[in-house]
Amino acid sequence: MSRYDYDLFTLGAGSGGVSGSRYAASKGARVAICEDSRVGGTCVIRGCVPKKLFMYASQFSDAFGDAAGYGWTVPEASFDMATLQAAKSKETARLEGIYRTMLGNSGVALVEGRGRVIDAHTVEVAGKAYTAERILVATGGKPAAPAIPGIELAMTSNEILDLAERPARLLVLGAGYIAVEFAGIFRGFGSAVTVAFRGDAPLRGFDEDLRRRLATEMTNRGITLAAGFAPASIEKAGGEFIVRGADGSELRADAVLNALGRVPNSAGLGLEEAGVRIDAKTGAVVVDAFSRTSVPGIFAVGDVTNRIALTPVAIAEARAFVDTEFGGAARHIDHALVASAVFSQPPIGSIGLSEQAAKAKGFDVTVFESDFRPMKNTISGRNERSYMKLVVDRASDKVLGLHMIGVDAGELVQGFAVAVTMGATKADFDRTIAVHPTAGEEFVLMRTPRKD
Ligand code: NDP
């Protein structure tokens, strides 16, 4: 009999915490998990899921617009935010219920309240101490609040998902995932949207061709891009927000979204006091490849470790941790090849190295690309193009990077990610017979390299 109450005690019932806890329980471990907010975490409650529901809602405006070319007469459409909010809240509540049921069915004990690590084997929740052989910190992240006077006046991704009314003018600060996703969503709802960012194009780190094309498509949709704008202050005056830039310029709006990044949720958990190393610059819990912190017995996965802040990465890290610690098979995940989608409008899907990153790493690359008007847009008259790109290592013929901006990019890249993960070569792509007529077939029909 173990001298601990549990074999595993997890802090945070988000994607990483829930999946790791359930998986450990399936291996026979006695597991408890604590949560001080809603079960499901950022992804289910205030991130991926409600965001994507909002995206679907916003895309009806495209569908109504495109319908006429196909012979439909659609009466003038109107949008009711309250209806969407009610439906979204019902759906997240349903999912939270499923998460709770799944935890219960797996035999994981749910402790409601904020956990605090006391030592390597003790967690305190609401005044009660729980002991465990291992502790897993999976407390996620939260919106960053850079030192900009008035930043607290801006909404974050948490609040924008609960807005009761659609703002007439929305100003989005930043141009990362969250910024471009909400910009597209609220433009689709009919808001006048401005995206203000300090760089020269959205989505720093993505392939330059995708960035440039996203900027063009966002502009075509009527979104104003204020590049080179570094926010210096925010104030509210006369019912509107005034955001001043470092260069003295000024932007005004009815609502402001702070999409200036996210930070790990590592403070106030007793971690440093227990000896767990926290990165002073990022606030991340420092871990090794096996998600071990500096304190034996304490582990961390997901956004709190600031490796790659994506739900599937947190889940994969958690499962690798469980296999290693409870399954007798030490393994860790490969963070080098992780596909992701940005639900901008049009969306982006990407895996592997951008052309610029491949060159920076010293690869001699051949680039294949396809730029086309999707078939649906011919009759509808919509002026939106799709673009695909393969970055191929000339020496080995291996596909180093696969990138797309266009309808269904996320779905397509998920499929191709298997091939890229397996180390597919361009010759493998070439011998794959196309599925016609689809957009995805373009990925296997690129025969002529770009002339550089
Ligand atoms: P990102 O890191 O993607 O973007 C942050 C943006 O804020 C960048 O444009 C950055 O500019 C800017 N910024 C940061 N600090 C400042 C500052 N002080 N002044 C001016 N600009 C600033 O963060 P997000 O919050 O959008 O998303 C966080 C993470 O969550 C993502 O990286 C992703 O991992 C995950 N996510 C994934 C989604 C998906 O899979 N679809 C959806 C949403 C989030 P610069 O580039 O110049 O540094």
Image (cartoon, helix red, strand yellow):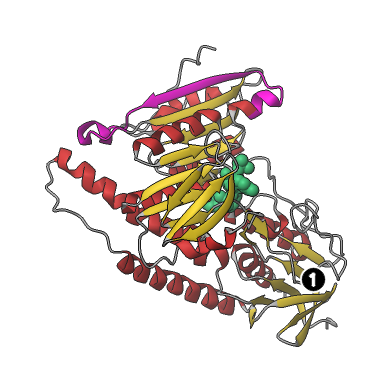
Instruction: Say which quarter of the image contains residue 277.
Output: bottom right
**The N terminus sits in image quarter:** bottom right
Amino acid marked by disc 1: Arg
Residue 176 or 100: which is nearer the viewer? Answer: 176
Q: How many numbered circles are shown? A: 1
**Residue 33 vs residue 230: left or right?**
right
Residue 28 or 35: which is nearer the viewer? Answer: 35
In percent of width and height, residue 179 lies at: 50, 49
**The C terminus sits in image quarter:** top right
88 is higher (above) or lower (below) than 51: below
387 is higher (above) or lower (below) than 150: above
In percent of width and height, residue 182 lies at: 44, 52
**Residue 132 vs residue 68: left or right?**
right
Residue 362 or 212: which is nearer the viewer? Answer: 212
Q: Residue at the location (87% across, 64% down)?
A: 295
**Residue 188 vs residue 119: left or right?**
left
Task: Tell whether position 359 is magenta.
Answer: yes
**Residue 306 vs residue 38: left or right?**
right
Q: Which residue is mark 1?
A: 134
Q: Residue furthest bottom?
A: 128
In percent of width and height, residue 136 lies at: 74, 67
107 is higher (above) or lower (below) than 302: below
Q: What residue range appears in magenta?
A: 357-383
> Dot 1 lies on which element?
strand
In percent of width and height, residue 428 lies at: 53, 26
In the rendered image, is residue 319 in sight? no
In the rendered image, is residue 4 in sight? yes
